[in-house]
Image (cartoon, rainbow, N blue to C red):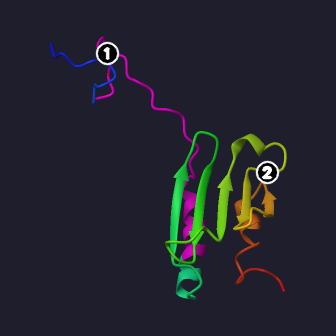
Amino acid sequence: MSSMSEEADPSGIRPGGAAVAPPSLVTFNRLELNRILNLYGRMVAAGEWRDYAIDFLKDRAVFSVFRRASEVPIYRIEKDPRLARKQGAYSVISATGLILRRGHELDRVLLAIDRKLAVV
């Protein structure tokens, strides 16, 4: 038997066979991430976006888009399941914190920043 404490057990299984449940995080599913990355790829090809970051937090998932890696994000695409029954789980937020669009469907929310599909 090792002298490791339960907190330092790297396997995630406590003595006695009970697995430690990882903290619950909000994530984008494969279809959502595919849609976001398709938009990101088009904008990189157009020379408008250069970098991104993905954060999976307890209360929301955030895809941040940067014009340059050292700047603040120009857009944040957020998924907040707590708002799913109210205003919609998805939102696009500008660098100033202004919510550009919020809704229940990711495709419709992304129209706020997807110039190719937006109707002018």
Graded by Cα atoms within 10 Å as few (under 14), some (14 to 19) or many (20 or more), the crowding at tag 2 reads: some
**116 or 102, which is in the foreground?**
102
Q: From the viewer's perspective, tell me whether residue 42 is left or right of residue 91.
A: left
Indicate yes or no whether the magenta region holds residue 28: yes
Name the residue that disc number 1 marks. 17
Question: Image quadrant for the N terminus?
Answer: top left
Q: In the rendering, at what x and y percent does residue 61 appear?
A: 60, 50
Q: The residue under label 2 is which amino acid type?
A: Gly
Q: Residue at x 57, y 78 (%)?
A: 67
Q: Residue at x 18, y 15 (%)?
A: 3
| Residue stretch rendered in magenta on the structure | 11-40
Q: Residue at x 70, y 77 (%)?
A: 114
Q: The residue under label 1 is which amino acid type?
A: Gly
Residue 98, quarter of the rendered image:
bottom right
Residue 101, quarter of the rendered image:
bottom right
Q: In the rendering, at what x and y percent does residue 5 appear?
A: 28, 18
In the rendered view, tell whether residue 74 sits above or below residue 106. below
Choose the circle earlier in sequence order: 2 or 1: 1
Tag 2–tag 1 contact (CB < 8 Å): no
Q: Which mark is residue 106?
A: none
Q: Which mark is residue 88?
A: 2
